Image (tube, coloured by chain):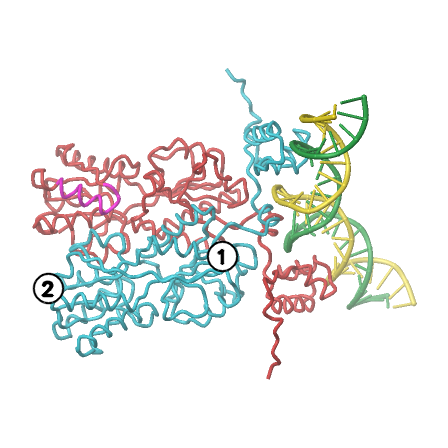
Chain colours: A cyan, B red, C green, D yellow
Amino acid sequence: MRPPERQEAEEERQPATMSQIARRLKVSESTVSRALAGSPLVKAETREKVEALARELGFSVNLNAQRLKRRRSQTIEVVIPVEEYGRQHMSDPFFLDMIGALADALTDAGYDMLLSKRTPWAVDAEGRPRPNPLLSGRADGVIIIGQGRDQSQLRAFAAQHRQVVVWGDPEVAGDYLLVGVDNRAGGRTATEHLLSRSRRRLAFLGDPKEPEISQRCEGYKDALRAAGMPVEADLIVPARFDAVYALETITAFLGKADPIDGIVAATDVIAMTAITALQQAGLSVPGDVAVTGYDDIHSARSASPPLTTITQRIAEGGQALVATLLGAIEGGPARSRVIEPELIVRVSSG
Amino acid sequence: MRPPERQEAEEERQPATMSQIARRLKVSESTVSRALAGSPLVKAETREKVEALARELGFSVNLNAQRLKRRRSQTIEVVIPVEEYGRQHMSDPFFLDMIGALADALTDAGYDMLLSKRTPWAVDAEGRPRPNPLLSGRADGVIIIGQGRDQSQLRAFAAQHRQVVVWGDPEVAGDYLLVGVDNRAGGRTATEHLLSRSRRRLAFLGDPKEPEISQRCEGYKDALRAAGMPVEADLIVPARFDAVYALETITAFLGKADPIDGIVAATDVIAMTAITALQQAGLSVPGDVAVTGYDDIHSARSASPPLTTITQRIAEGGQALVATLLGAIEGGPARSRVIEPELIVRVSSG
DNA sequence: GGCAATTTTGCAATGGTTTGCAATTCCTGC
DNA sequence: GCAGGAATTGCAAACCATTGCAAAATTGCC
């Protein structure tokens, strides 16, 4: 029915602008801007005409112009700094859960989420720093997941900017906004749980060079000492986050250490890896060895056996990170927030 | 030694601008702009002065102004559309692997990565569409992970824009740029592998409503038919992506079906969940039942038993997505790319 | 019909950077 | 000392939207 309209297939059509709409409607750009922003200053009839034409032209406001003018990007940069291990994969599902929680919370708040594996202060291959996300208008705020091994740069960066929130351990924190779990309490809770199940020789699996892990390890030691038991350095195994490497470490450990009957793992991934290693070594879980994890990642529930773990309430954590950050951006007196760890008892701990 | 400089702690310091630098150095803004951009038009001596002052002032170029002027955002939007399932968590580690691969590839190419769980055409709570990322200058290109159940909107969107690349199945693709694995071939390969291990009663676990899964299922059927074996509808179990739900489905299936000796799982997560269910049912893997997965997610290697799977070469896929998209943005004749699936034999398949 | 109060609209400046083109400065050689 | 060319620099116009303030249009009321 329609005549063939060849010219519709234009080359590289430029996006419509407000001034085009203004011209076609013989109104000013101001009116168009206000109409599309839903300002009560414009007559309803005018607004409708503007909206109709905008729809017809497929108009989308130019966000770069808008952000420039408003000095607001409505964007938050989320940093998962794995670069400390070189170009290693961020393989722990904890990150996926956290990213998902942050994406939801940010979307709800009307913010875009920029995801980066490099810290804002990281330099590129040529040694030049990338433009500061806060000063360059790239983002209105920054969420950093993890404090990292070297905290001096994080401290320096956070000292310059109010709009930064860190996920990490409260004990370790510097003078910056932080949301996180009391890892020491969590580590202690997990350990006490195993002790209450009459386990007597407990290993801790996790690399204490990471500040959060180190606190979990302190909690483990606390619980042992409180129970009047010795802390054996040999039983602290610096298993890495990465499951593949962790498997080797753990298997080697199982091979050379005196038998143990419990494992406090620093993360769920390490716990699940340890269970694999135990089963491969012919040991049953929780029969021979009871295991606790940490994080309550999504798959802990469906692991085999289902994993007893310390929940970090990741969804809640993500929301708290966003709420704290947005508070700081609004200029209010934002406060750090500590989320209480909670023991989730499933099968792996006997 | 330094006298106390109270005024350093200013309230809300505005970021430095090029015109400030220009004024202090008594040069024009053009010169500052060119100097910082490394243009050969400015004298080396001038450049150094500009760079020095920029460093001193902590100058970061205003990206919103730059992007407005350049009509380039150097940003790619990556969409993981899980909204089709409501606000469900994107729990499959496949996504994490893919996000990591894309983040690396985009960073290397000098692009920022915007991560969204909503498709560009999704409407918000009030029914208004969000500004089109391509028309609003929010992003120079869009990568969409997965084709989704309803492809009409994807087709419509991709038809409007050249700068869109989809991760998905080549067979199912519409007229848009796509990078993906031949899922049918992969499903077939996995099935043939189990048949070659003398397994005779194979179930397929995965929801064929998803286009990619559906192709894997077709491959499964192909292999059975090629081997002269019947395709039993009862043996195709629509297990969902999500491990927790999948566990119930699979357990129920194992309870009521005739015994099987092999499982072709549509994803690694489903495979690992199935293994859990099997073990809980007292069946050994691969002794009683051999299992293959799909994706080769990071943890497949360290699963118990290590999982035989079809690799999607996620890192390569991420690079290909980025390369294809950047090609399309540059305007060149970008081409879709099919990645060949490959069988990775580990322990779970016997 | 006329005046004041309201409602709507437009003007013009502003946000910070980039870039084509013209103007200036510098250098070389004669 | 000067022409001619190359190397630098500056001017000014974009890029597109927002917003304070003033101007215009409309309404209400006597």
Q: Which residue is mark 2?
A: A283
Image location of residue B282, percent across then percent down: 7, 50
Which type of secondary structure does the marked residue at label 1 adopt?
strand
Given the current orientation, which residue lies at the most extreme top position? A1
Left or right: residue B261 compared with residue A157: left
**Chain holding disc 1:** A
**What residue is shown at x 11% (from left), y 50% (from top)?**
B280
The three-letter amino acid code for the residue at tag 1 is: Gly
Q: Label 1 vs label 2: CA separation?
A: 48 Å
Main SS class of the magenta portion in the image = helix
Left or right: residue D10 compared with residue B58: right
Per the image, is B243 magenta? yes
Per the image, is A137 magenta? no
**Chain holding disc 2:** A
* Magenta residues (range): B240-253
Between B330 and B295, the one nearer to me in the picture: B295
Picture disc at residue A141:
1
Image location of residue B113, percent across then percent down: 46, 51
Left or right: residue B82 compared with residue A220: right
Q: Looking at the image, is B278 positioned above or below residue A258?
A: above
Which type of secondary structure does the marked residue at label 2 adopt?
loop
Between B260 and A221, the one nearer to me in the picture: A221
The three-letter amino acid code for the residue at tag 2 is: Leu
Q: Quadrant of the N terminus of chain B?
A: bottom right
Left or right: residue B188 compared with residue B11: left
